[in-house]
Amino acid sequence: MTPPLSVLLVEDDPHVRLGCEQAMQLAGIPVDAVATAEEAQRRLSADYAGIVVTDMRLPGMDGMALLRWVYQLDPNLPVIMITGHGDVTLAVEAMRSGAYDFMQKPFSTNDLVDVVRRALEKRALVLEVEALRRRLDHRDDLEARLIGRSPQMAKVRQLILEVANAAVDVLIFGETGTGKEMVARCLHDLSGAKTENYVALNCGGMADNLLDSELFGHEPGAFTGAQKRRIGKIEYASGGTLFLDEVESMPMNMQIKLLRVLQERVIERLGSNQQVPVSCRVVAASKEDLKALSDQGKFRADLYYRLNVVRIELPPLRERREDIPGLYDQFLLQAAKRYNRPPPTVTPEHLRRLMALDWPGNIRELRNAAECHALGIGRDASAPGAGEALSLTETVENYERLLIANEFTRQQGNVARTSEALKVARTTLHDKLKKYGLI
């Protein structure tokens, strides 16, 4: 749920500040009170989730100067001015400069709360519209990067949009080649930390001591050959995103250290006793079921539950065959551009054979097939085993699955409307949706 918006109160008189603060707290309105405009500036940003209530007369920067500064920062951020008796001229000037409203001393706390609530409602609407606009922009970007009209991929994209800007760790599960690192990159690029470092590390096949140094860094003399300080991946990713691929292969002793980092958000470089605070989102990826591994004692259960705050499951390509034509076409165009060759023609027969394969290497294997096709390496090199004719049953099932998937997507996952459009009984459609892995 979205946390409630808050009020930044700027008032140098401690008695007035306390009275306003208590009035809003009693009304259930979160409030943060400061004594100077300079201190308020340090707490404000263009996307500040709240409003500003400020006295006109302040030490140092006055309320009018703060109002103008806020207007430059974000013209949609409401500012309520508190003016003294006889400051009507200043109040009019403040309204012309973009103030939301003004309160003239002395005022009742009820009037203050009423004005604040109206301003908060306006701010909430503005932030909601802005969030929606960003989500629409991000959705277009996601659809270009995570190609697929299948319901499974629509769910993946929606989940990414929902959690990208939240400071929450994510576990990505999927077979080899399903695009786990692309999802991790999308989470980073669509987050507020997109300008910070994105650091990727594959945990598989790395010796314990090397992995330790890669993650945590080391001090000079920590081990033989350590001649100077090295910043580890976790510390380097602070403020951004740390992507740990094949986390299932991480040794047990390293799992304990990673768990401590996730819980306490501090690290110690090898050869040092000094704790270094870190703040980064951890995105872990695994091709194995970590819950099953933890049940077998092959992966720490506490680390699994700590990583599994949000879980994104990527479907294998064989479960979303309707996405193969779009993916193949995109990979073919990219390969043709890379190798400076004209894009080859894809015949219906060739496409039918592509869709008939299981693609155990998933998207990565399909990309390799497209590159071979672009280079002209064998007419059927892109479809190993494609010379084998499909049975009538397999051909009919592939076509039926494609028709149902396309209509189900067009109807936004509504079973009733899909059954009506396809002129098939709802129970029959539901069985077929389950059979083809579409729900």
Image: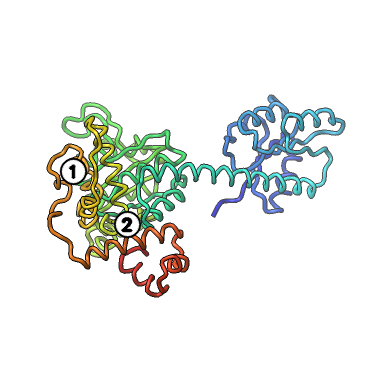
Label ID, residue 197: none
How many C-alpha atoms fall within 10 Å of the one at disc 1: few (<14), some, or many (≥20)? some
Horizontal side, residue 217 vs residue 150: left or right? left
- Residue at 43%, 41% (x, y): give it: 190
Horizontal side, residue 115 vs residue 161: left or right? right
Residue type at the position of mark 2: Tyr
Answer with the quarter of the image where residue 409 lies: bottom left
With respect to residue 12, does 320 lie above or below? below
- Percent x, y of residue 238: 39, 37
Label ID, residue 304: 2
- Percent x, y of residue 401: 31, 63
Q: Which residue is mark 1?
A: 206
Q: Label 1's element?
A: loop
Looking at the image, the residue that sits furthest to the top is: 60
- Percent x, y of residue 256: 28, 51
With respect to residue 302, does 426 lie above or below? below
Asked if one can make out residue 256 in the rendered structure from this viewpoint, the answer is no
N-terminal of the pair, mark 1 or mark 2, is 1
